[in-house]
Amino acid sequence: MSRYRGPRLRIVRRLGELPGLSRKSPRRAYPPGQHGQNRKKRSEYAIRLEEKQKLRLNYGVTETQLVRYVKKARRATGSTGQALLQLLEMRLDNTVFRLGMAGTIPAARQLVNHGHITVNGETVDIPSYQCRPGDVIGVRNRDRSRQLVQTNMEFPGLANLPSHLEFDKNTLVGKVNGVVEREWVALQINELLVVEYYSRKA
């Protein structure tokens, strides 16, 4: 399944708030479609699938990528669900978004893809790059790049900077000081249901 490029508010209405996907709030509080207002009781499978879709659409990853992250999280020590969230949160596109350089994760991905972002002084155009503690995230030394980021910073997606990041608004340089903690994950999700979803599929 490829990356979602359709109407974002339709997804927000169906799955609930997705801070990485859209800053807008839907006018209608019920899911889209003819039967949106009278939903039937959902099965356990449907609940798990919905949580998985929340994760996939919020972080803008494909199904194949998410399966790869789940396998990687299973190999890590500690909670698989927490390791999965950390892997997704430490992606370069999400880190750029959390630093406030872009209003949404798709906007941050575009900044990275177009070569506007540097990691440790080198231009990195791979959104899935895994940021590590000690990495310095900056803006390429070009007027166009700096102008784009400064415009984006006037309308940040999230108000609070997570504890594992620091950012200097004057120099447009951010630093990764550690790995994100669970309470700083902005998405409201039960990651255990996502792990269960893939366990039952395997």
Image (cartoon, grey):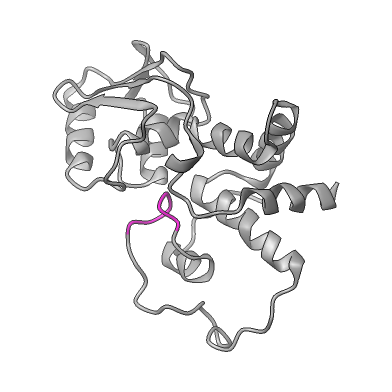
**Residue 27, above or below 82:** below
* Residue at x 81%, y 47% (from the top left corner): 199
Residue 88 in the image: state x and y as whole percent: 54, 36
Residue 160 rendering spot, x and y as whole percentages: 29, 42
* Image-based side of 9 in relation to 200, left or right: left
Which residue is the extreme one toward the left? Answer: 170
Give whichever of 54, 147 is nearer the camera. Answer: 54
Query: Which secondary structure is most common in the magenta stretch?
Result: loop
Residue 81, by quadrant, is top right
Start-end of magenta stretch: 18-23
Of residues 129 and 180, the one nearer the viewer is 180
Residue depicted at x 84% and y 52%: 200
Q: How many marks?
A: 0
Q: Position of residue 113 (x, y in %)?
A: 42, 31
Residue at (41% x, 15% y) in the render: 135
Left or right of residue 128: residue 43: right
